[in-house]
Image (spheres, rainbow, N blue to C red):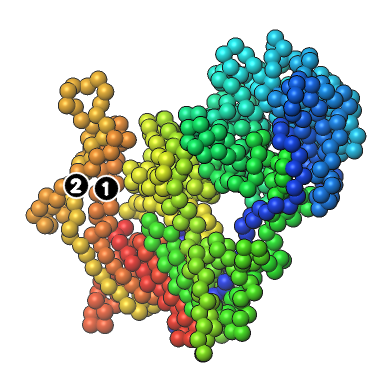
Amino acid sequence: MVRNLTSALTAAISANARVPVVAVTLQDQLQHFALYQSPNTQDGWHGACLASDGSIVRVRLSRGGNAFTQNFQFQRVTTPAQASQWASWTTLNNGSGTMFQDGGCAVSNNGGTLWAFAQNGSTNALRAWSSTTNAASWNSPVTVLTPPAGALIKGIASAGNNDVFFLYDVSGGEAIGCSFFSGGSWSSLRSWTLATIASGSGLDVWWDGTLYWLIYSDGYTLYEATYQPSNTTWTQLPPIAPATSTAIGRISPRLSFDSTTGLYNLIVSEVDSGLLTGSVYSYPRVRQSRDLQHWSSGFILHDVTTLYSAVELQSSTNTAAYIVSMPSVMQSPNFSQSNAQQFVDVSGRVLSYQRLEQLGHPARLELVLDNNQGALSALVSSASNYQPIGLNTFVVLSEGYKTGSPPSTPETVQVGTYHINQIIFERSPHENQLRLVAYDRSRNLDLLNRFQSSYSNQTVAWLITEICARAGFFLLSLPATTQMSQQVPSFVLLSNQSYRRALDELCSTYALEYFLDQSETLQFRELSASDGSVWSYQPEVELVSFGSDDLRGNHIIVTGKPPTGGQVGALTTGEAYDDVNAHLVGLERLIHHIDPKLTTTAQCQLKAGFLLAQEQRAQTAHQVSVPANPALQLLDVITLSDYNAPQGSGQSSNCRIVRSTVLYNAEQAEFAHTLDLEGV
């Protein structure tokens, strides 16, 4: 979809005299978590939240000796820079020598009232402590309830909505129950209606105003479900991380929301005893999501050793993020344009650049900056000094022209966001330059998926959203067409397979194209011959090539999964024909495509039509050089109209952009745009 331009900028692009304007900012928006505090407290079940006054409130269960006579303690951190506050713990009233160490614990802020939860080790009652003073003082505990038959609890969570959820022992495994505080007392047990899991290794919960989202572990599989309190409906969702036999354990999921990124964070300890693999570790993995349903594969904090996970919290001023575990506290500053170590405008130092966009590949930017007298050298990151110019940091590029008559008002539109891949210093007796090679974030689709996931009977739209989320893409634009709601009987995201390969496999089945736009939104398109032209060229054309290619199919046969229960040898097929081309060339050019994900004749027929349309588009092969146009994106349709003979070729065509190259060179006064085009 064409980028929106003002009428003034649109007029400037078509004017005979143009004054280019480019803007480039370098930004370090990455989270660089580094060791902040080392309290080295004994590892164990713990929880944390922010109090209303901005202080960090933590709770923990001690471990060792008799599992049923442990202490339930709290901590209040008002000044995170003071190491002593992270090391000091106070035992809660009636929480000394009476608590079950493996029941888990939780603390939440419920509109100003803090609730802390743990299980009593002698009565097995779920106990709750409250505070209305931001944890400066606590009331005596009350009993929420006692699980059926005095069952042991295997994980506790609270979403801060005067609620508590917990895993508890039942015949054959574990169930989830919950209770709600209202009218001065806690409600009776509400137990779930879903299948029992084999064992319990923690859970957490999030309230979105309508639904509770629960994430829980049996020690190996990371499950997800929802609970709707208005009608007491429990719904099982696909697992976030299926079990990998018993090689890798997953313990103590912890949910949080980062308001600075708009993403939910899920931290889970991944544990390998080495029994099957030979590798021994226990570190947190941080996954992210925008909708609480589709989660990224995440990243690991290998330098944090903990069996009981960690909690991500924002500082009260939103200037920093913390990842808090029992042995250590990690911190990362949040991004701010006012921070000179995170943001710099280098528009005045741009000497030249080339940006290249093409389908199926990450967009590439090669940028040359003036580094006269080493002015930019101090802005390059090192391992201990993060700066705006660093590996994987952001390059934001905007293009435009001066508008008005005469042109005097700079006006630009953002055309790309890139991540630095190479930093090259170039110096000679006559020049000192910094060359940056960067790619857009779709390069992350080429990363490998570690854990295999299998999906059954999910829609095309759901699967695309899932694959993109696994790769860390949460902003998508999907076409609102009927095929997006078609169900795929079975799809497997293989271990050691790139996300791009999985996405391409799905998109090829349903004839979808995609690219990453300037806002880092993945744009998916279902191409149609009726797509309208967004720009017309005639006098602006500097060089044009009208071409065609006849080596293409004109008879498509698509074979899907054979029907079940039918005659021996029965097939599921669909066919499409280009009679006009067959009459023109006097040949049948057959393409036979097999896709077992297609289960009906209608799906095969649809796929045959898509493949034939692509063959017809490929017949056209045009190229045009025009003044740089920041409005145009991949897959946009434009109109080319050359002058009639003898001045021109007399050709005209509607065609679609499949490759775009922009060259800017200040010294040579060059600002050119080359478009490679196919048919519509």
Of residues 213 and 498, which is closer to you in this image?
498
* Residue 187 appears left or right of 560: right
Of residues 275 and 155, which is closer to you in this image?
275
Q: Quadrant of the N terminus?
A: bottom left
Q: Earlier in the sequence, mark 2 or mark 1?
A: 2
Q: Residue furthest top?
A: 149
Place of residue 165 in the rendered image (x, y in percent of width and height, measured from the top left): 69, 25
What amino acid is found at the position of numbered circle 2 in the picture?
Ile
Q: Are marks 2 and 1 in contact (CB under 8 Å)?
A: yes
Q: Residue at x 38, y 32 (%)?
A: 490
Q: Which residue is mark 2?
A: 591
Place of residue 46 in the rendered image (x, y in percent of width and height, measured from the top left): 73, 34
For the question of whether residue 300 can be seen, the reply is: yes
Q: Which residue is mark 1?
A: 611
Q: Residue furthest left?
A: 586
Of residues 514 and 326, which is closer to you in this image?
326
- Does dot 2 land on a helix, a strand or a loop? strand
Q: CA distance from mark 2 to mark 1?
A: 9 Å
Q: Residue at x 89, y 31 (%)?
A: 138
* Residue 589 appears left or right of 178: left
